Image: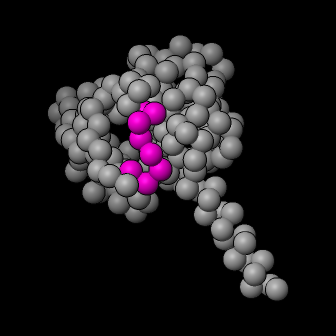
Amino acid sequence: MTLVQLTTPLTEEVARSLNLGDTVEITGRLYTGRDAVHHRLHHGEKPPVDLRGGIIYHCGPVMVKDGEAWRCRAAGPTTSSREEPYQAEVMRDHGIRAVIGKGGMGPKTLAGCKQYGCVYLHAIGGAAQVYAERITRVDGVDWMDLGSPEAIWHLWVERFPAIVTMDAHGRSLHKDLLESSAKALEALKA
């Protein structure tokens, strides 16, 4: 397990070089995307931005208008499992190299990570203000018709921290913990 500095956009080679347990700090562009964004992308709507090599952050940030500019006040991760029906295809169709969220994702996304060269990065729930401090500017917003939490926010981040919990080698910390917990529970029952 190492600390890896990442700069967006990411290449497939960089995504595949990351391993389970690596801590990363991201500098560059993140795009937010929650349920409504994934649904649109999955059903063929062309994204308003080029997502190739990009990172999608499962986040509904709290934004405040300051004159003509937007300021991010909170940017905690949202539960990623809701995107499980869509995530693998969205990674494939749009060349996404990383997804940030909380709680992990399932076997379909894990298979997609391995096949398409993508990683899942876990962000800590409850740290919304800490993550907002790493967002140095908001460069735009698209699909505001979905509502502010569901829109695609263009965030510029500096040293945004996360942990690789699903890698492009088919390994998942979430799967491992579920299996070891089930074994421990069975042992307690016996």
The image shows residue 82 at horizontal and vertical percentages of 63, 45
Colour scheme employed for the rendering of this structure: one colour
Number of marks present in the image shown = 0
Report if residue 31 is visible in the image.
no
Residue 93 figure quarter: top right
Please tell me which residue lies in front, 123 or 150.
Answer: 123
Residue 179 as seen in the image, left or right of residue 133: right
Q: Residue at x 78, y 77 (%)?
A: 186
* 57 to 145, vertically: above or below: below
Q: Main secondary structure of the magenta part?
A: loop
Q: Residue at x 41, y 27 (%)?
A: 13
Q: What stretch is highlighted in magenta?
A: 15-22
Which image quadrant: the C terminus? bottom right
The image shows residue 54 at horizontal and vertical percentages of 40, 27
The image shows residue 183 at horizontal and vertical percentages of 72, 72
Please tell me which residue lies in front, 166 or 83.
Answer: 166
Report if residue 140 is visible in the image.
yes
Q: Which residue is drawn at 44% across and 25% down?
A: 12
